[in-house]
Amino acid sequence: MILTFKVDIPKHFNSNEKSSFLALLIEQGQVENPNLGKINSCSLLCIVQLDNNPVAIGAIKHVYKTPFTKAEVPELQNEYNDELGYIYVTHNKSLNVRGLGIATTICRLLLKKLDKTKVFATTEENEDNHMQRVLSKLSFKKVGITYQGNKTKKNISLFVKD
């Protein structure tokens, strides 16, 4: 079992890698209108492969300011221009990659490559959501109020890293 992590700007990913990224983004089911345009507009992408099978993704996305408004902390929105997002590890049981720390590694690699301190993330507020623990490990702090996601209608929290 060989896990490989590729972190780079979108133009350094070939069309097969971008298609695999998009397939996992669709599988994740959390993004409104997932498409190659959204992928290409990211600052950084990460794709993880297990023996040449794509199993996980993540990105540093260009910021949109609505989470700060929805979380009722609009005064913070100008401080944060990068969002850690699209973090997903496949649930495909035949690949058996859950619980290996892949999401944490993706986040660490992206943040290291970004080389900035002020980053935000949004994730579902739920005791079973592993991403909340990952963000906490990486010194992200929850700010503002919980709000409802447009696509998922789930409770979403805003996290910031200074």
Image: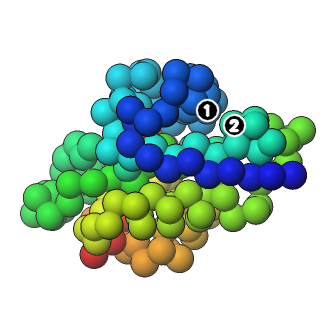
The image quarter in which residue 52 lies = top right
Which percent across, then down, holds residue 122?
Answer: 40, 54
Compute the Cα span from label 2 to label 1: 8 Å
Q: Is residue 124 left or right of residue 117?
A: right
Question: Which residue is labeled 2 in the image?
Answer: 54
Which percent across, then down, holds residue 49?
Answer: 70, 43
Mark 2, secondary structure of its residue:
strand
Q: Residue at x 14, y 64 (%)?
A: 79
Q: Is residue 112 left or right of residue 20?
A: left
Q: Residue at x 89, y 38 (%)?
A: 94
Residue sitting nearer the eye, 17 or 89: 17
Residue 157 in view here: no
Residue sitting nearer the eye, 135 or 155: 135
* Mark 2 neighbour class, 10 Å CA radius: few under 14, some 14 to 19, many 20 or more: many
Q: Is residue 32 left or right of residue 119?
A: right
Residue sitting nearer the eye, 132 or 11: 11
Q: Residue at x 31, y 33 (%)?
A: 41
Q: Residue at x 38, y 42 (%)?
A: 9
Question: Mark 2 or mark 1, which is nearer to you?
Answer: 2
Q: Is residue 55 left or right of residue 152?
A: right
> Reading the chain from its start, which is encountered first: label 2 or label 1?
1
Question: Which residue is labeled 1 in the image?
Answer: 24
Residue 7 in view here: yes
Name the amino acid, label 1. Leu
* Mark 1 neighbour class, 10 Å CA radius: few under 14, some 14 to 19, many 20 or more: many
Name the amino acid, label 2. Pro
Which percent across, then down, holds residue 28?
Answer: 59, 36
Residue sitting nearer the eye, 126 or 133: 133
Which percent across, then down, holds residue 72?
Answer: 20, 58
- Confirm or deny contact between disc 2 and disc 1 (CB under 8 A): yes
The quadrant of the picture occupied by the C terminus is bottom left
Colour setup of the view: rainbow
